[in-house]
Image (spheres, rainbow, N blue to C red):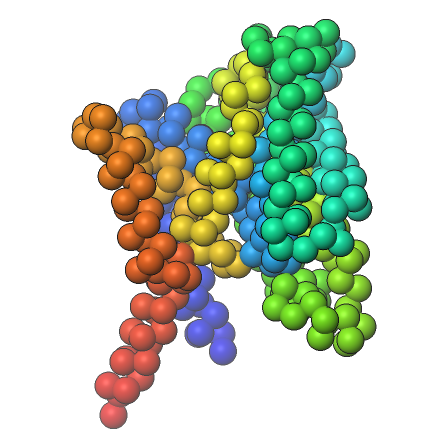
């Protein structure tokens, strides 16, 4: 049993090792920049996976929660002089409360109706951001958002986050923590009940599962991770504007989850990072890059209905089966 668990973990530990040592070896700040954006995309996807992959809640509001976190964090630092870490936590709380409110209002809707309701919420948030000039500065957005202050740890020199590489490690640390929480949730009693609700809500209710409360929890948790990603984004790019959080962002996060592997732990991470780097590598095709990008996504969805992570799991199972069959 221990050997089986180790065989499942070592590929992901290897991936983490590559994520840690890879960017410094390239010596390219732009690679670190893309890894920051990829980590934030992965964090958004991990959040959506909690709602969609674990609980079956189809949401188009992830971009809105992302924007709420970014604006709350930026406004706290710019207006009240709050520190980054205070603003970072407040961004997660604010987005989580928005998710809780939206969940309370819409969670009894099902399927397409819930998707439409979350799409409407996404659009409402963007309209408010664009038109609340006295607070959000409207379409121009907020500029001059400072980066994180050095983090002082006992016995260690202060940790600076001014360079792309240093900020990448900050984003990576938050992403790893989010993945760990996602894994723990997935394997907990609450996670098993969420999966039961996703697969057959009527049967789950008959067994005493509190479906409504669990779905609201999943929705709120998904929003919290998006809010934290929004804070990291705001303090990285140093300015925020409505276009960064439009419905296209929500669609991109959804595609990341589906391509990576809906309901898996590492699939959203793979999807978020891959869909950040892929457009960059396709720039050589100039005006044809978006056509190729779309065609590749279609091929992946058709060839790997379980996503990239699901395909890798299938290959691993086949390899283990062949290895066992080859033993005398």
Residue drawn at the location 71% of the way across and 44% of the way down: 220
For image coordinates 41% across by 61% down, the residue present is 306
Q: Residue at x 41, y 46 (%)?
A: 271
Residue furthest to the bottom in view is 328
Residue 58 seen: yes
Percent from the top left, x then y, of residue 325? 28, 87
**In this orientation, which residue lies closer to the viewer: 48 or 39?**
48
Indicate whether 220 appears above or below 24: below
Name the quadrant containing residue 186. Answer: bottom right
Residue 16 in sight in this render: no
- Give the number of callouts: 0
x and y percent of residue 169 in the render? 47, 33
Expressed as whole percent of the image width and height from the top left, the position of residue 91 reads 69, 29
Q: Position of residue 71 (x, y in %)?
A: 65, 21
Q: Residue at x 65, y 21 (%)?
A: 127
Q: Residue furthest left?
A: 285
Q: Image check: 59 left or right of 87?
A: left
Which quarter of the image is occupied by the C terminus? Answer: bottom left
Residues 228 and 62: in front is 62
Q: Is 91 on the left-hand or right-hand side of 22?
A: right
């Amino acid at each position: 049993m221990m050997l089986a668990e180790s065989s499942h973990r070592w590929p992901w530990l290897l991936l983490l090792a590559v994520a840690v040592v890879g960017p410094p070896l390239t010596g390219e700040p732009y690679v670190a920049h893309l890894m920051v954006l990829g980590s934030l995309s992965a964090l958004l996807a991990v959040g959506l996976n909690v709602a969609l992959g674990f609980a079956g809640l189809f949401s188009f509001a992830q971009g809105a929660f992302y924007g709420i976190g970014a604006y709350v964090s930026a406004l706290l630092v710019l207006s009240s002089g709050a520190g980054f870490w205070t603003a970072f936590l407040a961004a997660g709380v604010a987005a989580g409360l928005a998710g809780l409110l939206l969940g309370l209002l819409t969670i009894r809707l099902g399927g397409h109706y819930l998707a439409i309701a979350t799409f409407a919420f996404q659009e409402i948030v963007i309209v408010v951001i664009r038109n609340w000039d006295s607070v959000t500065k409207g379409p121009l957005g907020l500029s001059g958002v400072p980066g994180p202050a050095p983090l002082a740890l006992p016995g260690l020199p202060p940790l600076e986050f001014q360079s792309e590489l240093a900020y990448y490690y900050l984003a990576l640390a938050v992403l790893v923590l989010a993945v760990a929480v996602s894994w723990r949730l997935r394997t907990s009693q609450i996670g098993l009940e969420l999966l039961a609700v996703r697969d057959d809500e009527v049967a789950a209710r008959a067994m005493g599962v509190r479906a409504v409360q669990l779905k609201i929890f999943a929705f709120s948790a998904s929003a919290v991770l998006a809010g934290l990603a929004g804070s990291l984004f705001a303090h990285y790019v140093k300015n925020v504007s409505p276009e960064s959080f439009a419905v296209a962002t929500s669609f991109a996060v959804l595609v990341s989850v589906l391509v990576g592997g809906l309901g898996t732990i590492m699939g959203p991470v793979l999807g978020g990072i891959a869909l950040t780097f892929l457009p960059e590598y396709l720039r050589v095709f100039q005006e044809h890059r978006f056509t190729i990008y779309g065609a590749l996504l279609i091929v992946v969805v058709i060839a790997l209905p379980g996503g990239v992570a699901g395909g890798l799991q299938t290959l691993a199972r086949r390899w283990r089966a062949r290895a066992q069959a080859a033993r005398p």
